[in-house]
Amino acid sequence: MAGVATGIGVGAIFLSAGIAKLRSRRVFPGVVANYRLLPDVLVAPVAAALPIAEVVVGLGLIAGLRVAAIPAGVLLLAFAAAMAINIGRGRSHIDCGCGRSELRQPLSRALVVRNLVLAAMLLSLLMPTPPIGSALWFVALAFGVALYLLTLLANALSALAQGPLSMERNSR
């Protein structure tokens, strides 16, 4: 069950993040550039390819393609490393680029840990899965949707807590 739940939950996270980045494709190259990890010549191609890769990986995980766990894990680990490098450089103020541009979310150790946990959860895709349509599969589906919704909620709350309203409150 854990493999199905992880595939659906992490797949939905990748799918929604990729779609959000495609919707913000004029802003997203700036987010990639802000990480200051790529030469300028690679920023535009990476910013164009990354959302498509996330959508494809997300659809693969949701469809139950276990092989999609490999690129998903690589992406999550790369994102965690990019965030950790910038936090180490004292650049935690930049937007993580995790998804919705209207919920600008500064880098944090919690985001690094979240990506590492999600990457580790992908190992559950190596375990046997219940047959599609079985009662256990539907329970796993519910857990996968719950994982996705909890991640969205945590991201939104974190963005709101670090947004302009919290800064205004802290300056009083």
Image (cartoon, helix red, strand yellow):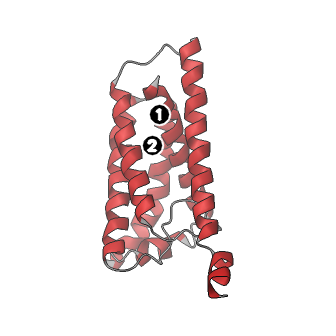
**Residue 7: percent from left, percent from top:** 47, 33
Q: Which mark is residue 7?
A: 1
Q: Residue furthest front?
A: 172
Taking depth in this image into account, of 147 and 4 the one nearest to the observer is: 147
Q: Which mark is residue 92?
A: none
**Residue 33: percent from left, percent from top:** 42, 76
The quarter holding residue 125 reads top left
Disc 2 target residue? 57
**Residue 139: percent from left, percent from top:** 58, 21
37 versus 154 height, above or below: below
Residue type at tag 1: Gly
75 versus 122 height, above or below: below
Regarding residue 101, the answer to whether it shows in the image is no
Give the SS element for disc 2. Answer: helix
Taking depth in this image into account, of 106 and 48 the one nearest to the observer is: 106
**Residue 21: percent from left, percent from top:** 56, 61
Q: Earlier in the sequence, mark 2 or mark 1?
A: 1
Regarding residue 108, the answer to whether it shows in the image is yes
Mark 2 is surrounded, within 10 Å at the Cα level, by few (under 14), some (14 to 19) or many (20 or more) other residues, namely many
Residue type at tag 2: Val
Point 45% across, 69% down: residue: 107
67 versus 55 height, above or below: above
The quarter holding residue 79 reads bottom left
Give the SS element for disc 1. Answer: helix
The mark tally for this picture is: 2
